[in-house]
Image (cartoon, helix red, strand yellow):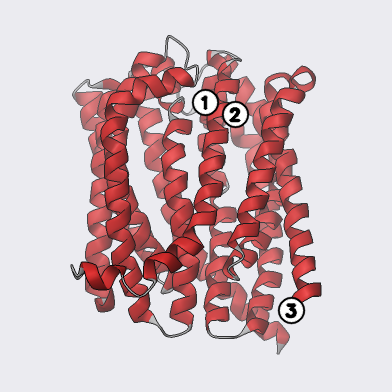
Amino acid sequence: MEQRAGKSIARELFSFSLPLILSGVLQQLYNWADAFIVGHVEGELAMGAIGATTAAVNLFITAMTGFTLGLNVLMAQLHGAGEDSRLAGMLRAFAAILLAVFAAIALPGVFLAGELLELLDTTPDMLPLSTAYLSVIFLGLPFLGVYNVYSAALRALGDSRAPFLAVAVSSAVNVALDILLVAVIPLGVRGAAIATVFSQAAMTVFIVAYAVKKHPPLRYKLRLRGMMGGGMVREGVRFGLPPMIQSSITAVGSLFLQSYMNSFGDDTVTAITTAYRVDTIILLPIVNLGSAVATLTAQSLGARDGGRAKRILRVGLAMMAAVSLTLTLIIIPTGGALIAMFGAGGAVVAIGRRFFACIAPFYVVIGLSTAVRGHLEGRGDMVCSSAVGITALAVRIALSYALRGVFGNMTIAYAEAFSWALMLCLYLLRLLWLRRRRGY
């Protein structure tokens, strides 16, 4: 019986996470399209200039996705408890809130992009190109705010297919416009940024239309009083604020790390930012399997089935170990070739190859850590999860500076790997503490 239950959970985790993985792959591919097309049409410097904006963009996107991660857990618990009407009200409230917040951020961001990049010590050669790209990218933030709230609600309902379809539409729009605005109409990095913003708008329109058609309770009703009443916003903030704070602090930490990385020169900046593009897509199975563990755990607890939540963790850990080891075996021999695909030169490819050789053996550590984190977050333990993430970031930054004399520019990889190990230890300690104190 236990074995059959384990197989059923494994199938559910797989079927839930696969569309999310595919949507993540497509999303990264259209990010790659910017770098790939710009790299081949405009050159290596322009490709590196786009990469140099990553930390600045992530400052806002990770705050957004962190908040909606908390909303997803709360919404999944509501769905498990059969309270879909409350879920729909929360969707409407926070779609309006995030739209307003990120519209307010986008406008000054358009005019202050250059100053932000100067604070990050962006190299003088890259600064004009990076500014041209980032000043346009800010305009896409309001669309992403609405998209992420709808994506969280649909995943809470068990519909992980919708984000995949939305990103498929976005990817097609982005690639077509990249070719038009970079290769045909020579707008350079600004053309790539325009393509990205239009693709984000298309993605948002699609997912809202999909939700209206496929899930009638999610249809938008402009009733401000009902949307904001009944403690709904307070409850959403209680779940969303801790991961948002953690994600925001992580993004700010990434700004420091970007500045630190810039000190190694253009080749290292181009190599590592390109390697992180590859690394992001390689880690998608880990990230989304962890999201599946969190969502299914939340649904189980909403239905008051604690035994199933425990089984989800056990099966998730086994699947995560297998997946992460497979990813390690894939990326070590192929990482350099993947970086070369972006038009990088020999020196850049060599640095990127070394980066993967250093960090890929630790994929199993981040995999297991992500599974335990998903379980804790599915139980609503957001504060601890966020505290662990902040602690690991502080250690990563400290080690980046402390180990520079030992590992050179590869300290970027080793410091991150060591922070993963710390996260796994702290999450396991939290899990053991909860089991002893609360008896689950």
Marks 2, 3: nearer the viewer: 3
Q: Secondary structure at mark 3?
A: loop
Circle 2: element type: helix
Percent coordinates x, y for residue 282 in the rendering: 56, 45
Q: Give x and y (percent) for residue 125.
A: 42, 9
Residue 279 visible to the viewer:
yes
Q: From this view, report whether residue 217 is shown above or below residue 408.
A: below
Q: Position of residue 76 (x, y in %)?
A: 47, 73
Q: For the point 49% across and 21% down, which residue is it?
A: 120
Front residue (pair 188, 240): 240
Residue bearing the label numbered 1:
340
* Residue position for label 2: 336
- Residue at x 23%, y 41% (from the top left corner): 198
Cα separation between marks 3 and 1 = 49 Å
Quarter occupied by the C terminus: bottom right
Tag 1 or tag 3, which sits nearer the N-term? 1
Question: Tag 1's secondary structure?
Answer: helix
Q: Amino acid at mark 1?
A: Ala
The relative height of residue 354 versus residue 81 in the rendered view (above or below) is above
Q: Quadrant of the N terminus?
A: bottom right
Name the mark nearer the viewer: 3 or 1. Answer: 3
Q: Residue furthest bottom?
A: 1
- Mark 3, residues whose alpha carbon is within 10 Å: few (<14), some, or many (≥20)? few
Tell me, yes or no, if residue 329 can be seen here: no
Q: Is residue 358 left or right of residue 110?
A: right
Of callouts 2 and 3, the N-terminal one: 2
Whether pointer 2 and pointer 1 mark residues with C-beta atoms closer than 8 Å, the reply is: yes
Marks 2 and 3, Cα distance to the nearest angstrom?
45 Å
**Residue 97 percent coordinates (x, y):** 31, 56
- Of the numbered discs in the image, which one, if any, rests on residue 440? 3
